[in-house]
Image (tube, rainbow, N blue to C red):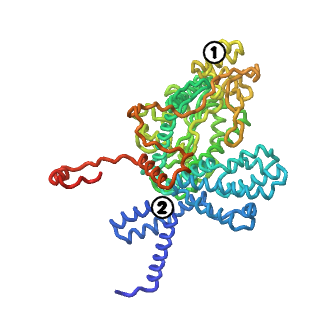
């Protein structure tokens, strides 16, 4: 074997070091990532040898995938604690509290690979830690004023909460102005609650895990569009568990009458079919008003810059990706729309319509905006949207095609189709895929009806609001008016109130909006509003709940409301039908009452324990034998039968 020169030895040593560094970096990743990448390496090793698998690990994983994974981890992982956190702990200078906090941080950094039970256990430990530290602080500042005492308790809980990457309730209220100590008490109770921490950590663990899937390139049209298979499975399982839970509950009124909770659920807007019908009704009503007013409509498609997309349409990783999640992109688009809306308001350009948020193949959201406006305002509105949509990363918009990819404008032509028809496919795709059997999804290339579940799972995973109407009257008042059945009392109250009720009762969204003051009505000028009333009971955090109880006419005043919710329902377990007994005689061995236990001696207690265990022991299960075993047993009848 020839000797290697110095340069070759250096290259080989550097290769070994790079391989060891890549293996160590892979070992620091969550277990499911290690399993996925090691399985890919095994395939390469079986096909092309170990050298090819090692080159993939050092070239593809270490140079391409690892930086993307680290971009994601840095947004969730906790590496250091902020200065001053240890001093706020009750045991300042005591290493016990700081050590416990660091142990919670260590477990927190394992969220993407934790099971649901482990996440709940961590949530309980965090809540107990906050409560214990506050209890220790209580002994130190019990003599202080209510304001200072509440402030110290809140700051302790909020500091720990923010260290664990969660938003502390009412943080800006406490840190920016004077506050009422009684108003801050529910926020403190939330940060002490295990259920509150379970919701927060479950949401973060799911987002962190899905974000890593996006970084690995597992969410794209070449693999699985919109969401990972795990997220889709979890969404379907959650829907199934919810339905099974609702089937076991009923609604009971004050008179003892009961109705099925699952039937009420299926008859509300929680049912995708009813939700879709209501959206189409509202959109059709807007189109009717647009035609009656002589307005025109434009369909705008707004897409985020390329740096917000993790994967290209070809399936390759986008090297310009900034590590943003779909929730980050949604916040960017919302901030962009806030600036557009403010600009339109300043220039007195009033629009109304509908906004639909849907995902690209790599889960990055984009918006479809159907806006109606007067004909003479079409060009100014287009100019405003174009200015703000093309403002970010304008260096990549050198061609007209690139600008059109960022902002695409389509004028609604009645000769080619209605405005409702333009968005009908988007609405169906984002809900249940109704009447889209023959349609193909241009993002994934698969049938549109099959991808509807993936889109719904995407919206649920990232908590993205899919539909939002711009302008018009509120839908909550519309739903409350549809609950009214007494038309006589409505007619005598107010003319606008009666017109709004009649329109809502027959499902005429256009007539309802007109009765409320028109499509451009302001909230303070509505003819009908919801009437709220406080509950007599407090919630788990000591807060008074304000609930809708009816509606009232603005011209008459809130002193004369019309109640729409006359019956008070409560959720109770479903009654179980009594089953017939096996016989008329109770064959169970009588059990001694608990109050007689101290009078029994040791032998009697032992006999009682044996009886109780015999009652709880499951019946023996009959095992199936093969034909050969049956023949063996018949040939040797003198042998005792085996114990089953």
SS state under label 2: helix
Question: Residue 141's spot in the image, x, y percent?
Answer: 81, 56
- Which residue position holds label 1? 486
For marks 1 and 2, the one nearer the N-term is: 2
Q: Is residue 555 left or right of residue 239?
A: right
Which quadrant is the N terminus positioned in?
bottom left
- Mark 2 crowd level (few <14, some 14–19, many ≥20, 10 Å Cα): some
What residue is shown at x 57% (from left), y 54% (from top)?
A: 121
Q: Is residue 557 left or right of residue 614?
A: right
- Which residue position holds label 2? 31
Question: Residue 184's spot in the image, x, y percent?
Answer: 75, 46
Question: Residue 354 occupies which quadrant of the picture?
Answer: top right
Question: Residue 355's spot in the image, x, y percent?
Answer: 59, 36
Q: Is residue 100 left or right of residue 217?
A: right
Which one is in front, 347 or 431?
Answer: 431
Question: Residue 474 occupies which quadrant of the picture?
Answer: top right
Location of residue 289 with respect to 211 vertically, above or below: above
Let me know if residue 422 appears in the view: no
Question: Residue 377's spot in the image, x, y percent?
Answer: 66, 31
Which one is in front, 411 or 344?
Answer: 344
SS state under label 1: loop
Q: Are marks 1 and 2 in contact (CB under 8 Å)?
A: no
């Amino acid at each position: 074997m020839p000797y290697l020169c110095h340069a070759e030895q250096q290259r080989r040593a550097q290769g070994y070091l790079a391989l060891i560094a890549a293996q160590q970096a892979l070992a620091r990743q969550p277990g499911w990532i290690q399993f996925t990448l090691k399985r890919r390496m095994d395939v390469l090793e079986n096909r092309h040898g170990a050298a090819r698998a090692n080159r993939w690990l050092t070239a593809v994983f270490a140079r391409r995938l690892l930086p993307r994974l680290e971009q994601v981890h840095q947004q969730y992982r906790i590496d250091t604690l902020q200065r001053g956190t240890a001093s706020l702990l009750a045991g300042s200078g005591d290493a016990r509290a700081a050590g416990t906090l660091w142990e919670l941080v260590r477990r927190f950094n394992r969220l993407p690979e934790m099971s649901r039970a482990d996440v709940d256990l961590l949530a309980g430990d965090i809540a107990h830690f906050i409560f214990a530290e506050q209890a220790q602080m209580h002994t130190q500042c019990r003599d202080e004023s209510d304001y200072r005492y509440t402030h110290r308790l809140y700051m302790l809980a909020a500091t720990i909460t923010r260290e664990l990457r969660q938003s502390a309730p009412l943080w800006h209220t406490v840190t920016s102005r004077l506050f009422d100590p009684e108003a801050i008490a529910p926020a403190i109770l939330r940060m002490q609650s295990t259920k509150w921490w379970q919701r927060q950590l479950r949401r973060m663990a799911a987002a962190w895990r899905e974000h890593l899937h996006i970084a690995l390139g597992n969410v794209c049209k070449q693999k699985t569009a919109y969401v990972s298979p795990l997220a889709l499975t979890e969404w379907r399982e959650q829907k199934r568990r919810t339905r099974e839970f609702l089937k076991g509950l009923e609604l009971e009124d004050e008179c003892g009458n009961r109705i099925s909770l699952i039937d009420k659920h299926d008859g509300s807007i929680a049912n995708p079919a009813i939700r879709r019908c209501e959206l189409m009704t509202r959109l059709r009503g807007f189109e009717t008003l647009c035609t009656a007013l002589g307005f025109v409509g434009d369909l705008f498609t707004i897409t985020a810059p390329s740096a917000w997309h993790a994967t290209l349409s070809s399936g390759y990783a986008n090297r310009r990706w900034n590590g943003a999640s779909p929730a980050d992109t949604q916040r960017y688009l919302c901030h962009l729309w806030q600036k557009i809306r403010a600009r339109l308001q300043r220039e007195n350009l009033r629009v109304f319509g509908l906004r639909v948020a849907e995902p690209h193949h790599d889960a990055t959201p984009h918006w479809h905006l159907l806006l109606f406006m007067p004909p003479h305002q079409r060009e100014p509105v287009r100019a405003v949207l174009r200015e703000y949509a093309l403002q970010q990363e304008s260096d990549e918009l050198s061609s007209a095609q690139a600008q059109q990819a960022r902002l695409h404008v389509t004028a609604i032509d009645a000769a080619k189709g209605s405005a409702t028809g333009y968005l009908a496919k988007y609405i169906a795709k984002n809900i249940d895929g109704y009447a889209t059997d023959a349609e193909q999804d241009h993002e994934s290339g698969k049938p549109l009806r099959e991808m509807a579940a993936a889109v719904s799972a995407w919206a649920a995973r990232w908590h993205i609001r899919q539909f939002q109407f711009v302008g018009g009257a509120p839908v909550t008042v519309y739903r409350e008016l549809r609950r009214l059945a007494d038309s006589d009392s409505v007619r005598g109250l107010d003319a606008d109130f009666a017109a709004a009720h009649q329109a809502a009762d027959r499902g005429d969204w256009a007539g309802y909006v007109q009765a409320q003051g028109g499509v451009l009505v302001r909230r303070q000028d509505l003819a009908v509003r919801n009437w709220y009333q406080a509950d007599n009971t407090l919630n788990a955090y000591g807060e008074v709940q304000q609930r809708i109880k009816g509606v009232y006419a603005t011209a008459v005043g809130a002193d004369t409301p019309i109640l729409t919710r006359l019956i008070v329902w409560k959720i109770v377990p479903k009654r179980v039908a009594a089953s017939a007994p096996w016989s008329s005689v109770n064959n169970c061995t009588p059990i001694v009452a608990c109050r007689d236990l101290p009078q029994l001696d040791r032998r009697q207690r032992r006999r009682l324990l044996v009886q109780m265990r015999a009652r709880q022991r499951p019946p023996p299960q009959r095992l199936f034998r093969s034909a050969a075993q049956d023949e063996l047993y018949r040939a040797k009848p003198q042998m005792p039968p085996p114990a089953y």
